[in-house]
Structure formats: structure tokens, C-alpha cells
Amino acid sequence: MMLRTAASSGLIRKLGNAATIRQLSRVSIVASGARSNSGGSSSAPPPPPPPPSNAGAAASSVKYAKTTAGTGDPEGSGATGFSTRGPVTWPALGLVAIAAASAVSYYKIERERRLENAMGKIVSSESGWSPNPELLARRQYVRTKWGWFPKEDTWGGAGKPAIGGPWSLVDLDGNLVTNESFKGKWTLLYFGFARCPDICPSEMVKIGKVMDTLEKEHPKLRGQIQPIFVSIDPARDSLKALRDYAKDFHPSYVFLTGAPQQVQAMAKKYRVYMSKADETEDGDYLVDHSIVVYFHDETGDIADCFTQSMRPSDIVEKVVERMTFVPSY
């Protein structure tokens, strides 16, 4: 035990001597530096290094300056004459949006107004307007409280088909007859040929019954109607052949024919299908054709179309309805 204590005391004395030697060495180096500065130069000694606290403040200031760049306050003191807001603000953006929306709305309203004025001049003109003149006839439009609407007629909103047009043929006396010859009259127009074995005679007899019914029930309307037969076989339907053919039908009929070019041009305007069929060796043939009766008003415009399936009573009802129709606007 005594040996261990003596060894520990010796070790402590050695460690104390070593610490003392290091302190003396440090004091000696500082003293020798001070003597050399005082002897070699008369200038003032260099300033001591800044304390650690000042160095930390400078670093913090630089860091703050980086994060406040562009604010006008690089030191972060908050005391600056510059505004901290940018040139664009939310209220300014709101005003711009309102102005843009107002401009777009005004443009749309003005555009619709000009289009409506231009459309009104076109659709209300004497010739009228059609979205597709090849399929639908031109119609006049009128201004209503709901906007521009087609002038009300028996065709309704769908519009009437683009059927008919100017034509010229000859009657049984050889006189020139045109569509203008029947202005002021309502007409029942039928295309057929004198050698037709069954369909044409049946349709013409049906129209004769319509005329007789109107004579009894609506004599005033009957006086305004003119039935017309147009031959689509001018090569064989001479004026003499048509005179003989006319004897078998209602006396009010007007029979017309013409040159092949005239007949074809008129049939095309009424979209009448016609074609030779069952031609024999001796040159005899039939003619396939559309079976439709075209009803025109007093101005020559198409008012309705009556097909083969309609009975005389059905046609009478339609004729009376069309001739007595009164538009509501």
C-alpha cells in the first residue's frame, strides 16, 4: 500500500511540472514577440482580432441580407423608405379580370346585334332566305317577341321543299302556257302519260272526285282551283292524242305538253322521276314515274303534296285546310 501511494505522488508531481513548463513556454513566446515589435518599428501594434461575439453577429447579418434581397432592406433593420409590396397586387388583378370580362361581353353583344340586323334584312326581304336553297324553298321571316321566325304557313317549322319553278308548255290549242298563266289560282298538278294503263287514270279520276266534292261543300274554294295534267311522254302524246284522252276525265282539267327538253326541264324542277320500262320489239313501252299531285297556292308556291295512298276525302280536307289557313303572326 505504501509503495502504491508513493508512486501516485510521483506521477502527480511529474504532471504538475509538465503543465508548468507549457505555461512558461507560452509566456516566453508572447514576451519575445512584444519585444521585437517595440524595437523594430515605431508604428502602433495591430488591432486585436474581433471577439467571437462580433464575428457571429457579422455572419448573421450577411445571412439575413441574402434572405432579404430585393426588399430594399438588406440589413434587415426594417427601417427603409421602399415599399415591401411588388408592382402587381390581388386587387389590381381583380380589376383587370373585370375589365377583360366586360370587354368580351360587349363584343359578343355587339356582334349578335349586327348579325341580327343583317339577318333581318335578308330573311325579311321579298325573296326570303333558305339555309339550303337546293333542298328547302326560300321563306320570308318575321320578327316576333321570340326573335326571327319563318313566316307562319302550313309547312310549319320544317320549311317547304324546294320544288317547282318557272316553266313553259303548250295547251291543247297550241297556245303557250307558263306558270304565270295560273297566278291567282290554286292548282293541282299531276305528271302522267296518255298510254298509262291504270295508275294515271286512277289518280286523275281521284282528282275529279275531289273537284266534285269541293263543288258541293265549298263552292267558293272550288272556283279558285285549277287541275292540270302534264304529259311526260311528248314523243307519243300529241295534241290530238291528248284531246282524245281528255274526254274521259273531269272537264275542268287543263292538258299540257311540249318539246322533250321543255318537259324534262319542268320534271326536273319538280323532282319527278321518269324512265322507260317494258319496251317491246315494236317500240311500245311504259313510263315509270313519280305518282304525286302537287298543290300550289295562288302565288305559284308549293302548298302541299298528295301521294297515291291518300283518299279523295283526305285530299279535300288538306285542300280546305291550306286554302283557309290564317297565320297567327
Image (cartoon, rainbow, N blue to C red):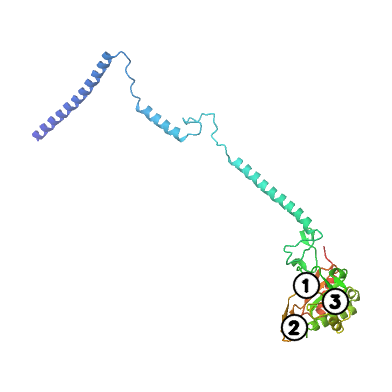
Give coordinates of residue 182: x percent, y percent: 87, 70
Amino acid at dot 2:
Leu
First along the sequence among labels 1 and 3:
3
Q: Secondary structure at mark 1?
A: helix
Question: Residue lying farthest front?
Answer: 282
Of 236 and 225, the residue lying toward us: 236
- Classify residue 163 as left or right of residue 96: right
Of 134 and 186, the residue lying toward us: 134
99 over 232 or under it: above or below: above
Distance between mark 1 and mark 3 Cα atoms:
23 Å
What number is the disc on residue 227? 3
Q: Quadrant of the N terminus?
A: top left
- Classify residue 204 as left or right of residue 280: right
Where on the picture, by quarter, is residue 242?
bottom right
Camera-side mark, 1 or 3: 1
Of 20 and 214, the residue lying toward us: 214
Where on the picture, by quarter, is residue 201?
bottom right
In percent of the image, x 25 and y 19: which residue is there? 33
What number is the disc on residue 261? 1
Question: Residue lying farthest left?
Answer: 3
Camera-side mark, 1 or 2: 1
First along the sequence among labels 2 and 3:
3
Give coordinates of residue 144: x percent, y percent: 79, 59
